[in-house]
Amino acid sequence: MKFLCVSCDEPMKLEKTESPQQGTLSAMFECPECFTQIAMLTNPSETQMVQSLGVKIGPGGADSAAKCPFSGALPQMEGAAPSEEGPRWTREALSRLENIPDFVRPMAKQGIEHYAESQGCPIINEAVLEEARGKFGM
Amino acid sequence: MILERSGSIMKSYFDIEGDGGSDVIAQVEAQQEAVREALSGVRNLVAVGSGKGGVGKSTVTMGLAQALKGRGASVAILDADFNGPCQAHLAGLDAHPWIPSPQGLAVPRRQDGIGVVSMGSLVPASQPVSFSTVSHGDEHVWRSTKEFAVLGQLLSSMAWGSLDFLLFDLPPGAERTVQYADFLPSGVSFVLVTVPSDISRSVVARSVSALAGTSAQMLGYVENMAGYFCRDCGEIKPLFPSSGTKLDLPLLGRVPFDPELASLCDSGWPERRDEAHKAVEAIHVVAENLLQALEAQE
Ligand SMILES: Nc1ncnc2c1ncn2[C@@H]1O[C@H](COP(=O)(O)OP(=O)(O)O)[C@@H](O)[C@H]1O
Ligand SMILES: [Mg+2]
Ligand SMILES: [Zn+2]
């Protein structure tokens, strides 16, 4: 979803969002040129519909002002910082981490590293993962 | 069609750089397809909900998993209560690594073979599972968005394989319960848990009428903490004054309050079936009735 300032022909930027009443959403956009503001208002069912989609709308990235308000769909969990030391990963093993949703990946990675350390494995390769899978997974 | 603005041509969607999400529908379809695909080997999806918190949804879910497992079924639990993921603890899988296989994440498994996917395995119980806040937004607006996004991703990234039962341990909230009914693949069956109190029964009654408007099926309800077993006189005595609120749903069973069960839940559910517990026994009856209700459905 994008909003265009018709007089300036400029894409408008998301300024803020509010939920004044239960289930409703007000998203305010502003034109960076003329500072005209508009608000998009959704009713509870519209809000809920979009909320339940869990899709990514608009670019991710750090610039939240450029994001569509619904990009709250981007789940991010505050997790462990990437480990500097500890076991090394082979490329194949590392690529398996792609199978883990990003919001839990750092924590899952750390858990595997703890396990590898407890087993005295300095390198995490596919064989280590397979062994762990047999031990911990269905 | 090109809209004109005082002589010049107004920018159209694709003139504005960056993906604004025009492919929402395609994304939703792809996500739903990924969830359906991941769950294609699961024969029965059963959601254990209520609307009310603290009534024993998680306890009943784990008890049912054990009872079904005891009947030879392959069972896994998905802990959908992201704000209080207690299944990991209940299952004794507090610090249990999640291992990626070539086909997806391996479903974490208890010693007895029950699969338990609970974020509590990754996050210590003392630390709440927190999602980074979206700037400018009221947190509650985003919460359910994130929950369903998380749920969709979890469901589609687990290697569920072939399972007889996948049980969903739902979070509280009548409204949320209905959102889950809409989100989960059609064919999901609901079991609702209540305690005998009037407040709880009326919350569950609200969930029942809201669920009636969805494609989900309701198998029945469980009355938990339905009295307590007095060890001195060997009788079940009431815990709550009886409620007049009717539930338009079959009763799958009554589970008494069992102080030993309460402590089992704190220390992790035992691996083996223990007939000595009145509540565990009662949950076996619930499992039996649930199987019959599922059979009748087919
Ligand atoms: N039948 C029962 N007997 C004794 N304690 C119970 C019983 N059912 C639930 N409990 C206890 O009640 C508390 C809440 O149960 P829980 O399953 O976590 O509820 P919910 O998932 O609905 O929030 C837990 O401490 C649990 O051990
Ligand atoms: Mg619970
Ligand atoms: Zn402008």
Image: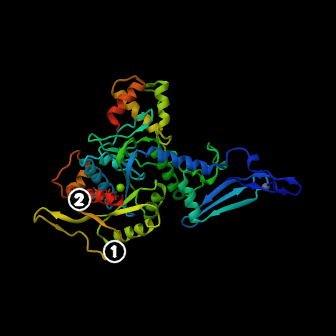
In this figure, which residue is indicated by the disc labeled 1?
B246
Q: Position of residue B261 (x, y in %)?
A: 22, 55
Amino acid type shown at disc 2: Val
Task: Tell me which colouring the rendered structure shows.
Answer: rainbow
Q: Residues within 10 Å of mark 2 (few under 14, many from 20)?
A: some
Q: Are marks 1 and 2 on the same chain?
A: yes
Which quadrant does the C terminus of chain B fall into? Answer: bottom left
Which quadrant does the N terminus of chain B fall into? Answer: bottom right
| Label 1 residue SS | loop
Q: Is residue B256 left or right of residue B203?
A: left
- Residue A56 seen from this side: no
Task: Please give the count of numbered marks on the rendered protein.
Answer: 2
Q: Position of residue B82 (x, y in %)?
A: 42, 51
Q: Is residue B294 left or right of residue A123?
A: left
Q: Residue at x 45, y 32 (%)?
A: B102
Which callout, 1 or 2, points at the residue further toward the start of the chain? 1
In this figure, which residue is indicated by the disc labeled 2?
B285
Q: Is residue B269 left or right of residue A47?
A: left
Amino acid type shown at disc 1: Lys
Q: Chain of mark 1?
A: B
Residue that protrudes farthest toward the top in the picture: A122
- Residue A70 seen from this side: yes
**Mark 1–mark 2 contact, CB under 8 Å?**
no
